[in-house]
Image: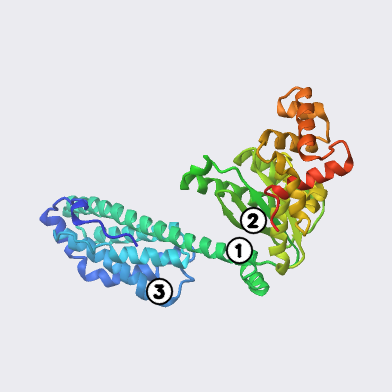
Amino acid sequence: MPPEPPPARRRAYPALSPGARTLAARCESRVNELARRMTRDTFEQLPGYPELPADVKDVEIAATVRNGLRLFLRRVRGTQGHSGDYRLFRERAAQRAEEGMPLHTLLRSHSMAVYVLWQALRDEATSEEEGALIELVDFLLRGHEAIIGVVAETYLDEQAALSAERREHHRSLVRGLLDGSLPPLRAFEELGLEGRSLVLHLQLPPEGGPSASAVAVRRTTRRVQTALDRAFGGEAVCLLGAGGGEAVVPRWTDGTAGRRACEELADRLGKVCGEGVRMAAVTAGTPSEIPAAARTAGDVVQVARACGRPAGWHRMEDVLLEFHLSRRNESSDRIAALLDPIGDRPELVETLRVHLEHRQDRRSSARHLGLHPNTVDNRLARITELTGLDLATPRGSALALAALLLRGDAVTR
C-alpha cells in the first residue's frame, strides 16, 4: 500500500462552534449501535454484501465503521489528525480489492455510512440546533471526500498490483508451455488448453523503433491483445512483447471460419500496428505439440520474410518449397557458400531475391526495385558471372533460392 501522506499535506478542518461539538458528543455513546446498524442492516442492500462471511461483516467491516465514526468525533472535538488516521481505511480497501469486491460497492458502503451518521445527528438535534447540525454536515462531507479519495486510490493501486502479478504468472505459464518446461497436464489445468489448438507467431514493427518507450510498448501490446480477443473470442493465451510473440487459441477447429478469423486478424493488426505485421498459424493436435507448432510458425514467418514476401498472414502452403529448402543438413553450408562472391554486394543480393520472388519476370522485378529492366538484366548477368549459377535454368534458380534462405534469417536449425 502507498505510504500515508505527511501531516503537513492534510486538509485543514475548520473550527466548529461549541454547539456543534456538543451535538456531536451526544452521538459518542451510539458508536457501537450505529456500527451494528450499518453492518447488519444498511449494507445488506449492497450487491454481494449479503454473501460475505459473517466474520468479515461483524469483525473487519464493523471495525472499519467504528474507526470512521470515532475519527469523525475526534476531529469534531478539535483533535489534530495524524499520519495513521487513514491506515485502517487503506488496509481494508486493499483487502477488498484482493477479495474481488467491486469498487463501486466499496465506495457505496462508505457513502451509506455517512448517511446513517447524518441520520443519527439529525435525530439528536433539537429545533434550536439547526445551525449546529448544518456545521456538522458540512464538516462530515468534507471529511468524507478525503476518505473516499484514499479508499479509491488504495483500491486501484492494489488492483493494479494484483493484475500485474496475474499477468506475470500467466506469462510465465505460457513461456513454460512454449519452451516445453510446463507439463501438458498443468497447461490444461491452468491455461484451459485441451484438444487441438491454433498456435500463432506474430512479428510486429516496434512502435517508435528500437528506442520505443515502455508506454509505447504497452500500448502496442494492448492493441494486439484486443485484436486477438476480437478474432478468437477472448480465448487466446499470449506471450507478447514489443516485437510480437506467440498466441495459443484452445479448442481449435480448422475450416473456413478459422481461415477467415486469421485473415481478419492479420488485417486488423495491420491497421492498428502498421503495415509491417507478419503472422503465421500452425495447428497443434495436443498441448504437448504446442512448442513444436510455435517453432514452426516462427520459421514460416522468417522464411516468408527472407524470400521477400510482403507482410501479412503467411500460410505454410505459400512458402512450402522455400520452407523445405531452408532446412539445414550436411549440404547446407556448401549451398549457402554459393552466394559468397556477392555477399558484400547487397544490391545484387536484393536483386536476386526480388527476381526469384517475382517469378523471374524482369519487368516486374524492375518496377519493384525502381530500376530500368536493362539494369536488372545487367545485375543478373553479374550474379551469374560471380557465382556460376545459371538463373535461366530451373536448377540454377532452385540453388539460388536455397542459398538465399540458408544465408538469411529463415535458418533456425
Q: What residue type is labelled 3?
A: Val
Q: Locate the N terminus and report the quarter of the image it occupies.
A: bottom left
Please report whichever mark, 3 or 2, sits nearer to the chain's N-terminal start: 3
Label 3, label 2: how far apart the Cα atoms are: 42 Å
Label 1, label 2: how far apart the Cα atoms are: 9 Å
The residue depicted at 63 percent of the width and 65 percent of the height is: 179
Residue 109 x %, y %: 39, 61
Q: Locate the C terminus and report the quarter of the image it occupies.
A: bottom right
Tags 1 and 2 in contact by the CB under 8 Å rule? Answer: yes
The image shows a total of numbered marks equal to 3
Q: What residue type is labelled 2?
A: Glu
Is 40 left, or right, of 188 in this rendering?
left
The residue depicted at 67 percent of the width and 72 percent of the height is: 184
What residue would you read off at disc 1?
A: 174
Label 1, label 3: how far apart the Cα atoms are: 36 Å
Is 125 left, or right, of 234 in this rendering?
left
Please report whichever mark, 1 or 3, sits nearer to the chain's N-terminal start: 3
What residue would you read off at disc 2?
A: 246
Dot 1 alpha-carbon crowd within 10 angstroms: few under 14, some 14 to 19, many 20 or more: many
Q: Mark 2 falls on what kind of element?
A: strand
User: Which numbered disc covers residue 56?
Assistant: 3
Q: What residue type is labelled 1?
A: Val
As displayed, is residue 53 above or below residue 218? below
Residue 289 image-quadrant placement: bottom right
Residue 288 x %, y %: 71, 69
One can see residue 120 in this view = yes
The residue depicted at 51 percent of the width and 47 percent of the height is: 217
One can see residue 108 in this view = no
